[in-house]
Image: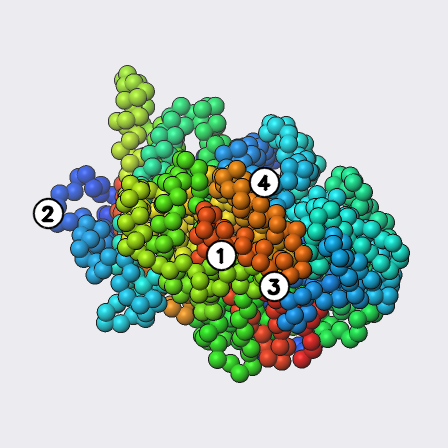
Amino acid sequence: MSAPSVDSVGVSTDTPTGAPASSGGAGYTRFVLRRVVASVITLFGITIVSFGISVLVPVRAETVNLSQQALANPEVVAAFREKFGLDLPIWEQYLRYLGGLLHGDLGISQQTGNPVSTDLANYAPATLELVVYATLLSLVAGVAFGIIAAAMRNRWPDHLARLVSLIGVSVPTYWLALVGSTLLFRQLGWLPGSGRLDATMMPPPRATGFYTIDSLLAGQFDVFQSAVAHLILPAAILAISTLGMILRFTRSSVLDGLSTDAVKAAKVKGLPHRRVLMRYGVRMASSPIITVAALSFGFLLAATVYVEQIFSWGGMGQYAYRASTNLDLSAITGISVVVAVIFLLVNFLADLLASAFDPRIRLQ
Amino acid sequence: MTKTDVVAAVRQATTTELHRRHRRLPAWMRRPGTIFAFVVLAFWLLIIALPVLRPYDPLATVGPALAPPGPEFLFGTDALGRDNLSRTLAGATVSIPNGIAIVVAAATIGTTIGLIAGFFGGWVDEVLMRLADLVFAFPSIILAMAIAAALGPSIQNAVIAAAITWWPAYARAVRSIVLAMRESEFVLSNRLSGVGTFRSIVIDMLPAVLGSVLVLGMLDMGAAILFLAGLSFLGLGAVPPTPEWGSMISGAVQYFDEWWLAVAPGLAIVTVVLAFNLIGDALRDQLEPRLQEMTGEQE
Amino acid sequence: MNTKNPRRAAASLAVAVSGLLLVTACSPGGSSPQASSDPDVLVVDQSFTAQSIDPATIFQVTDAIVATGIYQTLVSYQGDDPTPQPLLAKSYEVSEDGKSVTFTLDEAATFANGEPVTSDDVVFSLERLRNLKSSPSYLMDGLTVTAPDEHTVVVASENPASYIPSLLTSTATSIVEADAVREAGGSDAADAAETDGAGSLFTSAENGVGSGPYQLDSYDTNSQITLVKNEDWWGGDVPYERIVIRNVKNPQQQKSNVESGESQIALDIPGRVAEGITSETLDVNAYPSPEVLYLAMSTDPSSPTSDQKVRDAIRLGLDYDALVQLAGPGTLRAAGIIPSNLIGSVPAEDAIETDVEAAKQMIDDAGATGETITFDYANDYTRLAGIDYNIIAQAVQTQLAAIGLTVELNPTPTSTSLQRYIDGETQLALWSWPPDYGDPDNLLVFGPGGLIGERVHWTAEDAPEIAALGETARTALGDDREPAYTAWNEALIEEAPYAYLLEPTFTLVSSAAVGAKLDPMANLNLSQIAAN
């Protein structure tokens, strides 16, 4: 890898705690163990921060969940607080929470009355479906154009690609969502404006929670069509926001790959230009691309908060927004933990994959 | 790529800024993109510095409510009859300096922590990096929303909330550089000849670090402005009637037929963020080879 | 290892699949916005605030709407009639002394699970409402429920309580099938708050415990709620096979949906936006809402508003016409806290007239020129007919600046704003009071020492005569009620630390074929929507 390169979100892609050396099993085991321990500590920290927030925030849980008349009745307030364990001192609440966490119990959401794990199981697939497709779209377009830009360095396709990608990261996602929605839904009527499916359709029988997959599995082609139509606009908008980052990253990684001595040697040997590009440039770029894909995924998980609001998507973004403004402590903590787990998992897998592609990445 | 291109690229990569004598502006400043960016930024700086350039008082009702763009009001008026253009221009005073503040604060915190972690290594490094991971993994929006909700809505609190979620990126980048440089020859030789810890950090590491942080900061500037606008969009940043681009877009959501209310601040954000990104991009292209030099890494 | 081919193959596959998806998605039929109106399915768009569909816990708007489809109350508002009409009770009689109401149940009424509606079910439901100690439990304060026989229920109170029939239109008083709920762990005993375990019964599909024309099919508080037809409904034919209530936050989105035919009813389109609807196939109707948007001014010494003169000056200096204008077409001026469609209201013509000069003078006399007041409001509250509180607040800020007061806005999420209000920490606050039922009795909370009065530190000792007027109004009977409430209202207008801004109107956009209407409480009753 080249010297510490920083991409547009500023994370050094070759953090020395990278994927294991190709020295075989022992390296991997140590790496996995190390990562797991680090992740657990991080998650632990997240729960502490979430609980800490509740102490700082000046709103009492019952204010948001009870009617105003009920709030005036101390008996009702007491019953509510007891039901959610809010009458215990904060450290005891925290310990109870941790205990529950070990059993996979994330507590009860005050706003829905359901266990948080149930809520998340309901909403997570909607968000994941959106983010996965958005990441894929972004990757396909970003990598393709990035390679082209690198191949045609400093010629007009390169400049155009860079300009487009820069504009892409300069536009606020929610604004783009509003503009896109107005244009493509209200003015042109090409795409639907809200929700995941046509209102008159029933969701497919639940297998993965992804409407696209589930509808195909059940053979409901019309539901599949509707799901895809509803996905296009929000996924495309999300994709645009990370497209620029992936494009630039691919481009610089490919160029890095191309500037090695090995390439000079290859050219001297007379290898055709195309093969040089693919074998050296793109191959060198594969592992950083995987890393940046993981990063985009994480970034998009955050960006969905806006997009889900605008498209009434019914995913974790909306749930998180409601939880944050209603100060639903269990939900906030639950979401943070789950999102962090997803984020850490994705990065972990990316690091493993990256090392598979590029055996030179070292473990420290 | 032609041969001359390759030669030029190689030459560029191997000649450092410090040794080049030139009477012209450095190459990165001469690119069309950067020139455009500087023009845009100069425009906005002028707007911020000279309130008199705004056609109307951004806080006063000057016309009929929700008037479309016309000769009198170039970008129309909002629900309270205030001139949209003036408000958009005034918004620069809020968004740009506060965006810069976020980056400066995050960079300062991050660089300090990164320097300490990279230099001392060991358990200090572990603890600090786990902390960075924690903040990094925590969904930034939720963290920022919660902090802003706890502290109350105001631009200052939004800046604090944003800086708190932002510093890990800087810490990580700085730490990487420090780690790579720690083993490089000239640092080792300095330490061997008795240069103390603190001086070593300042003299050896800081210059390389600063370059990287500068690039990162410039690239982040745009994102910081977007983030601030996003917080305001969610209702947790600027307090009305202060015009701020994000809250203006948020207010425009329900006035969809009055498209000018969302377009003006949106375009403003895009131009400013684009300008910062262009400059940061060019800077990075220029400085990266130099960084390679200083960290002594072989390719 | 040759990584080129697998990667390229993967990339090509991805591109091909995307292309395929794009083609299928854009093909006509099934996915374009125009094509989805199935006459047996009713689609309703609303900005959700759903929380729980257990009747004894209902107090959010979305839940109340759903409840009108799957449950029934003893009496309800039907058509335009503002007096409670028989529903599960085929008749009711108020006693001479006004202290009790006797309801005679309709013997034909049955629940969806086939059980007949008996007085045991009524007593159970109402007692459970009381004892579950949830948000709407206060409705049963001071009331007792007895069942002299299987088809008669008597609801009584110690003091004359003329509001009982109105109260029993509230969806929280919906009647559920007692045996099924008991079997699921439900309880109406005094300790129900701890022992009741029937919560999950109410969200399970087709649970059969309601007597309404529909049954619950799915309940997702974030995206949509679906109802299915109750095949054996005792009340006759059911017009729709399914009703889908969707969460659509953006009013513009709701407008687009209803215009394109994707939905048939849109509940949250503000009047201003609805004015732009020209389609022949849509009905746009405005309904006065029984609530008033008001400013609460603290009488706590720490606030500049503790000075009576300052409060009077504020009332005098506000530009009410401008605020009414900002709130959208159909909005009315409010003279007092009792809205115009309830007894005891004061006509809008008699409302206070703006006099900016006099107000400025009063502020000057009080030595309060240049004083700073903090103005709290909820910046994400969209329930009130789509009125943007940000806009109203900024307008008030400008208006008060004109009389010499500096107003600092403090917009926070609803939760935080409400907390501050409840804790009595606000100096100036913007709120409305959504009514629980169509009787001015529920507005007595605004009196000195009442629920709202306490938030502005206005105690019964501060205004004993008004407190007395409130008591008189509460216990008045028959024809005495109106003058009693009017007297109380007028006293409040004179002395209470509130400024009354406006009465919003709710706009209902419905496809003409469906022809939906709102009831006198500006609520949508699903069971009253006839077939197209």
Mark 1 vs mark 4: give the one in front. Answer: 1
Decide which of B154, C274 is in the foreground and name it: C274
The quarter of the image holding the N terminus of chain B is bottom left
Judge whether A164 appears above or below A109 on screen: below
Question: Mark 1 belongs to which subunit?
Answer: C
Q: Amino acid at mark 2?
A: Arg
Decide which of C526, C447 is in the foreground and name it: C447
**Which numbered circle lies on residue C336?**
1
Q: CA distance from mark 1 to mark 4?
A: 32 Å
Decide which of B234, A263 is in the foreground and name it: B234
Residue pictured at 82% horizontal, 56% vertical: C153
Circle 4 residues within 10 Å: few <14, some 14–19, many ≥20: many
Q: Residue A333 at what x, y percent from top left?
A: 58, 40
SS for callout 3: loop
Judge whether C77 appears above or below C435 on screen: below
Q: CA distance from mark 3 to mark 2?
A: 79 Å
Marks 3 and 1: CB-CB under 8 Å?
Answer: no
Answer whether residue A126 is visible to the viewer in this image.
no
Q: Residue A122 at what x, y percent from top left?
A: 65, 53
In this figure, which residue is indicated by the disc labeled 4? A61
Q: CA distance from mark 2 to mark 4?
A: 66 Å
Q: Residue A241 at what x, y percent from top left?
A: 43, 56
What colour scheme was applied to this rendering of the protein? Answer: rainbow
**Which numbered circle lies on residue C521?**
3
